[in-house]
Amino acid sequence: MKSIIRISAFTFLLCFLFGSLQLLAQDTKKNEVFKVYGNCDMCKETMEGALKKKDGVLKKDWDKKTKMLTVTYDESKITLTQIKQKLADVGYDTDEIQAKDEVYNKLHKCCHYKRAKDKS
Ligand SMILES: [Cu+2]
């Protein structure tokens, strides 16, 4: 009889631990919406392709009209700045991080969006 109590207590403890671990894991999920400069569907593909699940980006959706990118990411794996850096690496500016000119220049002609830092 004693062992049954012990086993159920153990099971209960396990469930409790597992449950709280799952809660902790969910807590690291974050949602952000921010502007990414771009033009067209090709831009959307490039941007979204740069943000990978294995790096911690769970969901991404760039709106061509509003130029707003909605991301859901795992804070324990990637930071918002790192996400913006990844976008800059493939040629897309955010207000925080700008792409290098050489990367921007390599973008397809139709993807040459008007840059925030453009003087023209
Ligand atoms: Cu484009």
Image: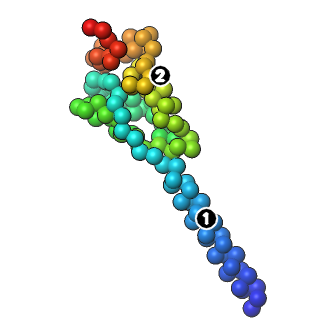
For mark 2, what is the residue?
A: 89
User: Percent position (x, y) of residue 70?
Assistant: 36, 39
Q: Earlier in the sequence, mark 2 or mark 1?
A: 1
Query: How many numbered circles are shown?
Result: 2
- From the Cβ of disc 1, is ligand 1 less than 8 Å away? no
The furthest residue to the right = 2
The furthest residue to the bottom = 1
User: Percent position (x, y) of residue 76?
Assistant: 57, 44
Front position in the image: 65 or 109: 65
Residue 108 in sight from this viewpoint: no
Q: What residue is rendered at 66% in x and 75% in y?
A: 11
SS category of the residue bearing label 2: helix
The furthest residue to the top = 120
For mark 1, what is the residue?
A: 18
Q: Quadrant of the C terminus?
A: top left
Label 2, residues with CA under 10 Å away: few <14, some 14-19, many ≥20:
some
Labelled disc at residue 77: none
Please determine whether, in this image, residue 23 is positioned above or below residue 31.
below
Front position in the image: 79 or 11: 79
Q: Amino acid at mark 2?
A: Asp
Q: What residue is rendered at 47% in x and 40% in y?
A: 57
User: Percent position (x, y) of residue 78?
Assistant: 53, 38
User: Percent position (x, y) of residue 95?
Assistant: 38, 25
Residue 20 in sight from this viewpoint: yes
